[in-house]
Image (tube, helix red, strand yellow):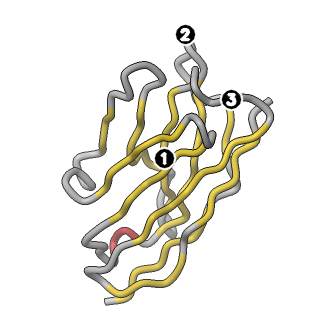
Amino acid sequence: QVRLVESGGGLVQAGGSLRLSCAASGRTISSYTMGWFRRAPGKEREFVAAITSSRSITDYADSVKGRFTISRDNAKNTVYLQIDSLKPEDTAVYYCAAKGRGTTAYDYWGQGTQVTVSS
């Protein structure tokens, strides 16, 4: 089992920045692809970014490319999401998730952290 705990959310003005953290426990995440997702009010959960276990290859949703940066520190068993140039439409609950090798679905999810962007 992998337990994921997100932190770093908050209220920020448009144009500001936040760094979200996802601390894992229970197992090392070095062999997991790690992802960030978000759910805005009244909308379905959507993919934001992911980083692979090997070579740390990254992938981003088109809506966040150039503004969001995902990274990982396997020594700290933590994944980060740097969010810059925040927009009101980035307001959402942000979730961290882990996907094991050879699987297509994310197996473990955190409880989420709220990001609210004021205009």
First-in-chain label (3 vs 1)? 3
Kindly report which numbered mark, 3 or 1, lies closer to the viewer in this rendering. 3
The quadrant of the image that shows the C terminus is bottom left
Q: Residue at x 29, y 67 (%)?
A: 84
The quadrant of the image that shows the N terminus is top right
**Image vertical order of residue 63 relative to residue 74, above or below:** below
The crowding category of the residue bearing disc 1, from other C-alpha atoms within 10 Å (few below 14, some 14 to 19, many at least 20), is: many
Q: What secondary structure is marked by label 1? A: strand
First-in-chain label (1 vs 2)? 1
**Image vertical order of residue 6 relative to residue 51, above or below:** below
Q: Quadrant of residue 57?
A: top left
Residue 114 coordinates in the image, percent (x, y): 57, 70
Q: Is residue 35 left or right of residue 87?
A: right
Instruction: For marks 3 and 2, give the CA distance.
Output: 17 Å
Residue 37 coordinates in the image, percent (x, y): 49, 49
The residue tagged 1 is 36
The residue tagged 3 is 28
Instruction: For marks 3 and 1, give the CA distance.
Output: 18 Å
Q: Residue 14, which numbered label? A: none
Q: What secondary structure is marked by label 3? A: loop
Q: Is residue 17 left or right of residue 79?
A: left
Q: Amino acid at mark 2?
A: Gly
First-in-chain label (3 vs 2)? 3
**Image vertical order of residue 68 relative to residue 91, above or below:** above
Q: Residue at x 41, y 37 (%)?
A: 50
Kindly report which numbered mark, 3 or 2, lies closer to the viewer in this rendering. 3
Q: Is residue 24 left or right of residue 18?
A: right
Q: What secondary structure is marked by label 2? A: loop
Instruction: For marks 1 and 2, give the CA distance.
Output: 19 Å
Q: Residue 102, which numbered label? A: 2
Q: Residue at x 59, y 36 (%)?
A: 75
